[in-house]
Image (cartoon, rainbow, N blue to C red):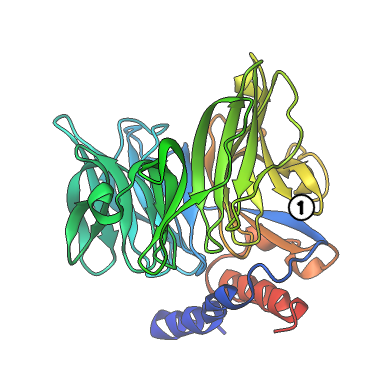
Amino acid sequence: MSIRGGAARMLLIGLLGLSLSPHVFAGQCARPDVRYEVLMLGTLGASGGYASDVSELGQVTGASSRSDQVGRAFVWDCLRGMRNIGAVSEDHFSSMGLHINNRGEVVGQSFSEEDITLFIWDRRRGMRGIESGNPYSLNDRGEVTFIGQGGTLRWTEASGSVPLETLTGINYREAFVNERREIGGYGAHPIAPDDRFLVWSQQRGVEARGPEPTDAYMNVLRGFNNRSDLLGIAFLFGGAAVPFIVDRSGQLRQLFAPRIGEYFEATSFNTLRQVIGFSFVSGESESQQPFIWDSRHGVRNLNMLVYGRIPGANEPRVTRANSINEWGWIAGAAIAESGPYDDPALLVPVPANNPRYRNLGRLRGAALCATLAASQLEQVQHCGR
């Protein structure tokens, strides 16, 4: 029996309603026995693009090219597939700084000959320009942190753009807002006049976090989760890069021992402290490999977790890992062995020995939604919820 129209939408809402529960159990458990299924999300008419972010409801945003090879921003979900939302990049390889929240809002950049506009988009009202800037983060209240002409700012529908230094007293160099409405980043404040890791909240004020890596010549932050952890990359003297986490207690932990000549650049993490990114050897950045790290397994090549082996001729090869949600779903890009371009992809962790999920990448529409929801339900049951 086929499911169409309103019935299909009700199925999607009912099944993916399970996705609201990660805020209850995230950080409490994680399945160790998983592999990844790769969902190729399609394109907007031509090859090339990437998935930039994935919400807990399984909605994805990213950029894809059309026949004119100009990148357009898209949103994707398992029922409707990919939709062009109108933002334009300089070309289909340009980063558009795209983020999506659980309300289906997207923040990103749209390029024109005159300007680069920071925008927010939703399905009901379409695209609305904010101002020139580069977004860092977007939470479920629609709060955006970004760097613009006035420094580092927070934007809300009600208040518009407000400098973070005015709001928090911190001169942030980089800043992210989480679901607790805390703002975490790197900057300076009278209690910590030298640049360092700082977190601000309305309830607790300003908190200085952790020492900097002593052997780093530069630290770059990549995220701020709902446990109030900061994720960064330490670029070390001698030629190496290694990700680190600064937790709520202020403890700084490098994820593994740095190796001279090897660069591990983190792109995202979640409340479970699963970290994703890419690695390469000095001088060979064109051969970069996507990785995932967790405290149990350490660092692993993501392609080794797809079907349990390096992809063959008929399987996609993961090339980018850009964002990870609370379910462990990863937004990125993959390429067929015979294909010329990276295309948008979503990696979904599933039980390693369950044949039900073996053909997940071939499903579409309501069948795909149902199977994705079943995998989430198994995760909830595994967690004892």
Q: According to the image, label 1 marks what residue?
A: 295
Instruction: Spot the residue most to the front.
Output: 191
The residue nearer to you, when weighing 242 against 68, is 242
Q: Which residue is drawn at 27% across and 47% down?
A: 165
The percent position of residue 140, horizontal first and vertical second, equals 39, 67
Query: Is 84 positioned to the left or the right of 208 in the image?
Result: left
Q: Which residue lies furthest to the right in this view?
A: 353
Q: How crowded is mark 1: few (under 14 residues within 10 Å), some or many (20 or more)?
A: few
Q: Which of 96 and 213 is in front in this view?
A: 213
Q: Quadrant of the N terminus?
A: bottom right
149 to the left or right of 362 = left
The kind of residue on which mark 1 rests is Ser
Helix, strand or loop at mark 1: loop
Task: Determine the residue positioned at 56% across, 55% down.
Answer: 229
Q: Is residue 262 above or below residue 47?
A: above
Q: Is residue 167 left or right of residue 57?
A: left
The residue positioned 61% from the left and 21% from the top of the image is 285
